[in-house]
Each structure stands twice: as C-alpha cells, then as structure tokens.
Image: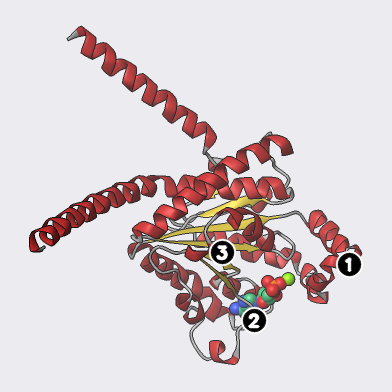
C-alpha cells in the first residue's frame, strides 16, 4: 500500500513538474490576449515589448516552437477533425508577409493554404463582404493563413468611408456571427494584430527605399495610408474590442522586433492547438488500431482463400 502511494505521489509530482515546465515554455502574455468584448486601449500595449528576452534566447525558443508547430500541423492534417484559421492584420510594414515566411517555414505546405486579401474585385464587391472570405475558409485538416481578411471591411473601408457608417457598423456583429459559425463547425480561429509603432513603420518604409531588393515592395500608398495613422488605430481599437470572443480571440503582438513577433505568434499558435493535439493523437492511434485489425483480417481471409 505504502509503496503504491509513494509511486502515485512521485508520478503526480513528475506530472506537475512537467506541466509547470510546459507552462513556462509555452505561454503568451495573458494581457496580450483579448477573448471577450471590451474597451481596448492600444496605448497600453508596447509594440517594442520583448518579454524580457534577447534575440539569442528567442532564436533558441522559436526553433523549438516551430518543431512543435510542425508536429501539430501534421496531426491536424492527418486527423482532419478541425481546421485552423490564422488571421494576420496590421498596418503596412507590420510584418504580415514576414510572419508567413518565418513562422510557416517549418510546416508542410501540403496542408497549408495562404489567402491574400487585396482590394475587392468587381465580382467580390457585388457580393456581401464575407463572400470572398468564406470561400477561402480552411477545410478540415487545413491550416489557413489570412494575409489581411474580412477585418479590412471595418478598417480601410471605415477609414476611407468606402461604405456608409450604418453599413460598416453592422459588420462587427456579422463578423462575430461568421466566426462563431466557423468555430462551431470545427475551425480554430486565431487573430493576430501586429502592433508596430509609428516610428518603426517610418524606419521600415525608409529602409525599403534604400534596399534595391525590396524595391518591388515600394508603394506610395503606404505613405498615404500612414497619413491616416490615428484613424486606423481607432478602427483597430473597435475591431479588436468588438470582435474578441472566446472562440475567436485577438492577440496583440508586439511587432517592432521581428524576432519577438515570430516567437510570440509561434508560441500563441502552439499553445492554442495544444488541447486539440492530444485528441488528434488519440484519434489517430485509434484509427491505426482499427486499420491494423482490418489488415490482419484481410490477410486471414486472403490466406484462407488460397
Ligand atoms: P497589400 O497587403 O500591401 O498587398 O495591400 C493590399 C491592399 O488592399 C491594402 O491597401 C488593403 O487595405 C486593401 N484591401 C484589402 N481588403 C480590402 C477591402 N475589403 N476593401 C478595400 N481595400 C482592401
Ligand atoms: Mg502593402
């Protein structure tokens, strides 16, 4: 009896230590997670935050996280019981493209679908604003990455008054209903706001002008849009505050440092997929067992026939 108890205690202790270790490894700043509707003050989030880490420490961590993410994506793909929708939003130069390039470098392209949302085409404009987005919603098993999204319809559209206020005001609720529909049908939704400072944006825009290899990225529109900085921040404040739910939360990503941005996003995704990962693994094992039994049965019948 005593021996069994001691073993139980030892096991429980080991599990606790492991869990604790895991929590330290994988945990985004709780304050950066907005998962219920509330008033958001973007000023309260420091775009230059690095979680007290330096670049070398981050490189070590991000490597580990990317390997875990690759494993999770493999399970997601194989189990095909959920879809994952990663929404990337942020001002020009905030790093949406860079995030896709770095964080997703480790995953298997066979199960990834990247969607870029640009100015709507005439056909897209002739439909409701969610039409083009819903068509690109990831299928079960797929990790879908949205480079911009339906949120543009309460951001650029609001800032530039492309539709009347009565129209865009209704969209927050429509977006919540849409994301709830996706979530209730097996889609895990994560939305990242890449938060950069105005000073850092200027530095990046000027850097692009100096770098010949980046000149394809130059756009006078970026400077024009920068002129609407405050209006955009206000529009983001509302989008984050009104469209934050438990099933489709927003993460405010400190994005002035590219290495921390990558780490933060990788960490958030890994953490969010973790509870599902165990279920996928269990189901895949079950599937393996069933198939193994079916193969054995097939062999038995096959050899009986001979
Ligand atoms: P980029 O991401 O740099 O390729 O630029 C795409 C552009 O398309 C951005 O300026 C967006 O604001 C714009 N865009 C995306 N979605 C919409 C939309 N629904 N309505 C108007 N402009 C949009
Ligand atoms: Mg651009």
**Residue 148, above or below 161:** above
Q: Is residue 127 left or right of residue 157?
A: left
User: Where does the image place residue 139, in percent across and percent down from the top left?
Assistant: 40, 69
Question: Which of the 4 image quarters holds residue 39?
Answer: bottom right
Q: Is residue 287 left or right of residue 205?
A: left
The residue identified by callout 3 is 239
Residue 103 visible, this orientation: yes
User: Where does the image place residue 32, in percent across and percent down from the top left?
Assistant: 57, 46
Q: For mark 1, give the secondary structure.
A: helix
- Residue 237's tag is none
Please state the total of marks drawn on the protein image. Answer: 3
The residue identified by callout 1 is 212
**Residue 25, above or below 95:** above
Give the residue drawn at x 44%, y 64%: 142
Q: Residues within 10 Å of mark 1 (few under 14, many from 20)?
A: few
Ligand 1 lies in quarter: bottom right
- Is residue 188 or residue 250 the one in the foreground? 188
Give the residue drawn at x 44%, y 73%: 174
- Is residue 47 or residue 207 the one in the foreground? 207
User: Where does the image place residue 143, in percent across and percent down from the top left?
Assistant: 48, 62
Question: Which of the 4 image quarters holds residue 156?
Answer: bottom right
CB of mark 2 near ligand 1 (< 8 Å): yes
Q: In this view, which residue lies farthest toward the right?
A: 210
Give the residue drawn at x 81%, y 73%: 216
């Amino acid at each position: 009896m005593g021996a069994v108890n001691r073993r139980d205690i030892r096991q429980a202790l080991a599990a606790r230590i492991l869990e604790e270790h895991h929590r330290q490894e994988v945990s985004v700043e709780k304050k950066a997670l907005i998962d219920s509707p509330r008033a958001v003050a973007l000023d309260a989030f420091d775009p230059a935050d690095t979680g007290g880490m330096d670049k070398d420490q981050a490189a070590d961590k991000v490597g580990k996280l990317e390997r875990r993410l690759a494993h999770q994506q493999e399970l997601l793909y194989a189990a095909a019981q959920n879809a994952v929708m990663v929404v990337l939003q942020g001002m020009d130069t905030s790093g949406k493209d860079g995030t896709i390039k770095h964080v997703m470098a480790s995953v298997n392209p066979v199960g990834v679908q990247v969607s870029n949302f640009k100015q709507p085409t005439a056909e897209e404009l002739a439909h409701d604003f969610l039409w083009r987005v819903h068509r690109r919603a990831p299928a079960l098993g797929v990790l879908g990455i949205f480079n911009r999204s339906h949120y543009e319809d309460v951001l650029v559209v609001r800032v530039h008054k492309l539709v009347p206020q009565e129209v865009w005001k209704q969209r927050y609720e429509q977006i919540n209903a849409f994301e709830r529909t996706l979530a209730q049908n097996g889609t895990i939704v994560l939305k990242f706001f890449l938060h950069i400072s105005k000073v850092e944006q200027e530095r990046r825009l000027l850097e692009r002008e100096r770098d010949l290899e980046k000149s394809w990225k130059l756009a006078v529109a970026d400077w024009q849009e920068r002129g609407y900085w405050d209006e955009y921040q206000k529009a983001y404040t509302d989008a984050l505050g009104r469209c934050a739910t438990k099933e489709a939360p927003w993460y405010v990503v400190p994005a002035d440092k590219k290495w921390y941005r990558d780490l933060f996003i990788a960490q958030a995704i890994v953490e969010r997929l973790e509870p599902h990962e165990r279920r996928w693994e269990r189901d895949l094992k079950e599937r393996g067992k069933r198939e193994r039994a079916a193969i054995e049965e097939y062999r038995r019948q096959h050899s009986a026939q001979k």
